[in-house]
């Protein structure tokens, strides 16, 4: 009976991830491996309108994203997040960031993110790879 319940939980979790548009880790790993960092830097200009990635810079319309990977969404000190994002339970990983950049309101309905989303898998992977190489990884 326990095995059945555990298997059911895994199926439910996979269904929720698929419904929210979260890519499988292996699929995203393949896209990140082939990512174009120059393209990611260029595409991050869209993000830079509202976000910083450098440490110790102030928040803009959106929070500073330095060290964001591994953090719970809505938990960066000094920034007022939407209630939806703060209560979402999302933890930022390359997979959740991919889903977020693809369509923020699909991952967290009711969020205040201004970006409608980027449909290009390659562009999202390039942005995420550039972020990881330039400050999005958690501080050790």
Image (cartoon, helix red, strand yellow):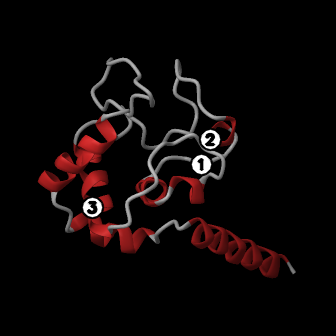
Mark 1, residue position:
90
- Is 1 above or below relative to 43? below
Q: Tell me if 73 is positioned left or right of 99 in this view.
A: right
Q: Disc 2 or 1, which lies upstream in sequence?
A: 2
Mark 3, residue position:
123
Instruction: Give the residue displayed 59% in from the left and 48% down from the top.
Output: 90
- Quarter residue 35 falls in: bottom left
Q: Are marks 3 and 2 in contact (CB under 8 Å)?
A: no
Q: Position of residue 91 (x, y in %)?
A: 55, 47
Q: Tell me if 16 is positioned left or right of 44 in this view.
A: right
Label 1 crowd bin: few (<14), some (14–19), many (20+), radius 10 Å: some
Q: Disc 3 or 2, which lies upstream in sequence?
A: 2
- Is 1 above or below relative to 62? below
Mark 2 or 1, closer to the camera: 2
Q: Are marks 2 and 1 in contact (CB under 8 Å)?
A: yes
What SS does tag 2 mark? helix
What SS does tag 1 mark? loop
Query: Could you tell me how far apart the alpha carbons at marks 1 and 3 are, in whole angstroms?
Result: 22 Å
In the drawing, what numbered circle is on residue 133? none
Query: Could you tell me how far apart the alpha carbons at marks 2 and 1 are, in whole angstroms?
Result: 8 Å
What SS does tag 3 mark? helix
Mark 1 or 3, closer to the camera: 3
Most extreme residue toward the left is 38
In the drawing, what numbered circle is on residue 85? 2
Q: Position of residue 51 (x, y in %)?
A: 36, 32
Instruction: Give the residue displayed 63% in from the left and 34% down from the top.
Output: 82
- Quarter residue 1 falls in: bottom right
Q: Tell me if 83 is positioned left or right of 118 in this view.
A: right
- Quarter residue 47 falls in: top left
Query: Could you tell me how far apart the alpha carbons at marks 3 and 2 are, in whole angstroms?
Result: 24 Å
Q: Disc 1 or 3, which lies upstream in sequence?
A: 1
Q: Position of residue 64 (x, y in %)?
A: 39, 28
């Amino acid at each position: 009976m326990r095995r059945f319940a555990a298997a059911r939980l895994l199926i439910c979790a996979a269904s929720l991830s698929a419904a929210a548009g979260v890519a499988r880790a292996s699929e995203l790993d393949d896209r990140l491996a082939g990512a174009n960092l120059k393209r990611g830097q260029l595409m991050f200009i869209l993000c830079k309108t509202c976000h910083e990635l450098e440490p110790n810079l102030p928040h803009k319309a959106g929070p500073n994203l330095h060290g964001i990977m591994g953090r719970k969404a809505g938990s960066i000190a000094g920034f007022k997040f939407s209630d939806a994002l703060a209560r979402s339970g999302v933890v930022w990983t390359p997979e959740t960031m991919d889903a977020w950049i693809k369509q923020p309101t699909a991952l967290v309905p009711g969020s205040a993110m201004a970006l409608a989303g980027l449909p290009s898998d390659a562009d999202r992977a390039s942005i995420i790879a550039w972020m990881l190489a330039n400050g999005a990884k958690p501080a050790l």
